[in-house]
Amino acid sequence: MISTKIIKSIIKLERNTMALSLLVVINVLFHFLLLSHQLVNSMQPSCHDEERNALIQFNKSFKLDCQSRPNPYLTIVVHPKTSSWGSNNGTNYCSWDGVECDVETGHVIGLYLDSSCLYGSFHSNNTIFHLVHLQELDLGYNNFTFSPIPTAMGFFPELKSLRLSSSFFQGQIPSQLSLLSKLSHLDLSYNTGVNDPFVVKNLLKLKNPNLGSLVQNLTALDTLFLHYVDMGYELGDSLANLTSLKNLGLGGCGLYGPIPSSLGELTQLSFLNLKENDFTGYIPSFVQNLTHLFFINLDNNQISGPIPSWFGNLTAREYIYFYSNKLIGSIPPSLFKLNNLESLDLSHNSLSGTLQLDSFLKLRNLIALDLSYNMISLHIEERERDPNTTHSNFNYLSLASCNLSKFPEFIGNQTNLELFDLSSNNIYGQIPQNLMNSSLQRLEEIDISNNLITGFHNHQTILPWSSLRVLKIQSNLLQGQLPVLPSSVIHFDASNNILSGEIPKSICNLSSIFFLDLSNNNLSGEFPRCSGGMISGSIIALNLRNNSFHGTIPLECQQQESDLRMVDFSHNNFQGKLQRPFATCVNLEFLDFSYNQISDVFPTWLGSFPLLKVVLMRENKFHGVIGKPEYTKGAFPMLQIIDVSHNYFTGALPSQYMLLWDAMKAFKVSDLKYMNAWENVTFNTHEIVGETTLYNYSTTFVMKSVATSYGKIPANLAVIDLSSNNFSGQIPESIGSLKALYSLNLSNNALTGHIPPSLGTLTELESLDLSQNKLSGKIPQQLAELKFLQKFDVSYNNLTGPIPHESQFNTFENTSFEGNQGLCGDPLWKKCENWLLPPSSALNKDVDSNFAIELDWKFAVTGLVSGFVIGLSLGEMVIPRTRLAWLIYFSRTRLAELMIRN
Ligand SMILES: *[C@@H]1O[C@H](CO)[C@@H](O)[C@H](O)[C@H]1NC(C)=O
Ligand SMILES: *[C@@H]1O[C@H](CO)[C@@H](O)[C@H](O)[C@H]1NC(C)=O
Ligand SMILES: *[C@@H]1O[C@H](CO)[C@@H](O)[C@H](O)[C@H]1NC(C)=O
Ligand SMILES: *[C@@H]1O[C@H](CO)[C@@H](O)[C@H](O)[C@H]1NC(C)=O
Ligand SMILES: *[C@@H]1O[C@H](CO)[C@@H](O)[C@H](O)[C@H]1NC(C)=O
Ligand SMILES: *[C@@H]1O[C@H](CO)[C@@H](O)[C@H](O)[C@H]1NC(C)=O
């Protein structure tokens, strides 16, 4: 996927806004010419008071706010043009910034106020609508605070160009726009709620009127950009009348059905972007007649069938993007006739066949190629290449999962290369010499993960690429020392190799690094201490899991705001006491030091880390009484997951803490996502680098008696595991306030007293283990209320009385209850002779329908989402209805995430 990788702006621009930016450039030139012209003309007193007043009033109707960035994906230069506008009668408004006048009449004919920091709601009584001579209006990239597009926009009789993109307009697009019969350029794109980068919400709708009736009479249109306007229907022949149309952008509009052949009437089309819809059917054959077409993007649709052989016929085609469709068959040889091709993305389809990589090199203009994730086998010719023949000079080359068995050596000569991705192939052996080539000065991202690579040429450990920012070498067979990285690196993943030795002190030179994953290697020694705290103040995620590090835990946060979100020290040999860092790690969310030999009392000071969500310290030598919070206010307010099992804690359960764990008190259905190191990362300090910043936390919990590996942790998961310690005393009644709990394990302690009935109010609970304690009394009837409970264990206590036999309790085995001399009733053999049986309610009528739904659910989840990890396994029997809805919603959200990552 070309768009999600870091590549220079040029390619990004091609993807989304290339035509736009060309227009911008042209516009700028145009303005320049105009301005010089205006300077000459501004002497002429041809002012119209009414228009001046209209401009002044318009200016007063908005605030200027250059801080709120309408779209964090776009780095736009904002400039409050209207701030310099005069307000007295003496100035000629024709010379004001962003205002263009007709040189003859002095009427305002153009207003170019894009990216001008305008902030506020936009009403139809705004004085801008008095400027009846207006021909061009550009108000894009401002913030109109969810106003509807004013109906009065339709009453500019002369309007030729209207640009309202990325400006927080909301609601139905008014039918009045169809009156703009002279309109040639209309751009209402990207009016989206994008503050959360993973949930794009289309703010504008085009339903009534629909697209067809809106543009029916706009036959002069030459450019129509309506990306992320909510439509949700088939395109039909709604565009058939737009015979002058050259640029069409309808990405993310919810369009479906075949791409209509009536588009074939649009013979002038040169730019066609229909990405992120649900278009089905084949690549339409009218495309072969579009002699001006230079850009076609059908990314993220359901286009099926083969790539037609006529594809090679046209000479003008330059950019072809078919990422993530259902294309099958082999790549037709005619494709290699596209001599003007600059950028080709066929990744994530089902294309097959064997191809010579050299065939692509003959396309001399090709600078971006992505064939990843098909079923293609790429072969590399052994022969020497003639150095005198020109061949493509790539910026971007992505050949992941292409069955490559060796490095394409020509890469070493690709001096313009900025990114290459050879991940998930079968490349074996060392990284060859010519790749370890310092002439690859522009190289920013390398992904060679998931291969069989054993090392760097000649065991070279100092890497030469001076612009390198992202290096992914995880899941290979790399041995020996960790390489020394260029100081430009921000993301380094070397996990799952067999690297050994100590970490070189040079790691402290990585002053911009924010992601470092060295997990699952044989690295040893102490982790270096750097002056800037842990490595550098910029680090967001550090994973040292499963190595052989020793010494004390190097948790360090800088005095000032540290961005650290996630640290995993687990499965090492760290020992001694925890060192309290100089400063509170104000952004730390995930902290894992399980499976070490840390010998300390409970680190109450961690409670002052305001965002800490996950604390895992299983299997260490923690000891003593946990006692009371050090701070009465805000001790672990965000905590959702705590595992202190297999330690030597004594004394009462930490009931005072439980009272303060606010994040576990309410199940928030609204934000269903995964915990990751992305949230709240400030856009200013960290550039957005495609997938790299989206780092999901992962770990393994023992729940329902099985170790469940969470490749991604659902953001709502709440877990308490205090098992296998020496806690004594009673289970506090207050535990019933932790309503969001999904799993509670208090097993293997020395707890006494009764099971508190308040546990019956933990309605999200799926796993409850109180086994191997000294609990006495009855199993509270209230526990039968726990509808989601799938694992329940009270074995080996001193419980008495009848076992509830309602709802979930009918499903538990006798092993859940054994070792309690006084318990009786199903599923134990012992009959309840002397006990009054609790009333039995009617059988759960939903069981059958649940089963049917379960099949649907499997289909939905497995069909929609790959890599979806959740504690429920498909083998499990009954998934209650509400949980089902939740899961499907969950999978949809994830799907949405996958679709909008560019
Ligand atoms: C095209 O325009 C003609 C004349 O204005 C109109 O009758 C027809 O319905 C339009 N077709 C579509 C598909 O909008
Ligand atoms: C299109 O133009 C025709 C003829 O001028 C007119 O009758 C019709 O109402 C217009 N349609 C729309 C949607 O404005
Ligand atoms: C392509 O153009 C030719 C000649 O103008 C025409 O006969 C043919 O029907 C067109 N094909 C499509 C699919 O529009
Ligand atoms: C495309 O080229 C093939 C030969 O490569 C030719 O047979 C066919 O007629 C051409 N189609 C068009 C529409 O020009
Ligand atoms: C609770 O923890 C113990 C170990 O401390 C483990 O053996 C048991 O399986 C856990 N119970 C559940 C239900 O996961
Ligand atoms: C079990 O509980 C009973 C009271 O219900 C108590 O008399 C007895 O001592 C307890 N036994 C053990 C081993 O704790």
Image: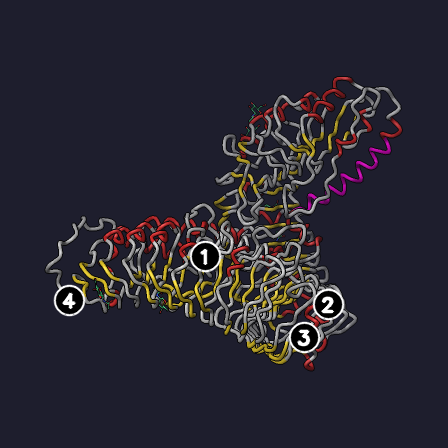
Give coordinates of residue 258: x percent, y percent. Answer: 49, 46
Mark 1 crowdedness (10 Å alpha carbons): few <14, some 14-19, many ≥20: few
Q: Which mark is residue 693?
A: none
Q: Earlier in the sequence, mark 2 or mark 3?
A: 2
Mark 2 crowdedness (10 Å alpha carbons): few <14, some 14-19, many ≥20: many
Q: Amino acid at mark 1?
A: Lys
Q: Earlier in the sequence, mark 1 or mark 3?
A: 3
Q: Amino acid at mark 2?
A: Gln
Q: Which residue is mark 1?
A: 628
Ligand 5: does it lie within 8 Å of the C-beta at label 1? no
Q: Residue at x 31, y 59 (%)?
A: 790
Q: Nearer the viewer, residue 679 or 135?
A: 679
Q: Is residue 819 left or right of residue 362?
A: left
Q: Which residue is mark 4?
A: 829
Mark 4 crowdedness (10 Å alpha carbons): few <14, some 14-19, many ≥20: few
**Is the residue under label 4 in contact with that under label 1 (CB below 8 Å)?**
no
Which segment is the magenta one?
17-37
Q: Quadrant of the image for the N terminus? A: bottom right
Q: Which residue is mark 2?
A: 414
3D distance between C-alphas at marks 1 and 2: 62 Å
Q: Earlier in the sequence, mark 3 or mark 4?
A: 3
Q: Which residue is mark 3?
A: 504
Q: Earlier in the sequence, mark 1 or mark 4?
A: 1
Label 4, secondary structure: give it. Answer: loop
Label 3, secondary structure: give it. Answer: loop
Q: Is residue 437 left or right of residue 726?
A: right
In the displayed structure, 163 sits above or below 501; it is above
Label 2, secondary structure: give it. Answer: loop
3D distance between C-alphas at marks 1 and 4: 44 Å
Give coordinates of residue 501: x percent, y percent. Answer: 62, 80
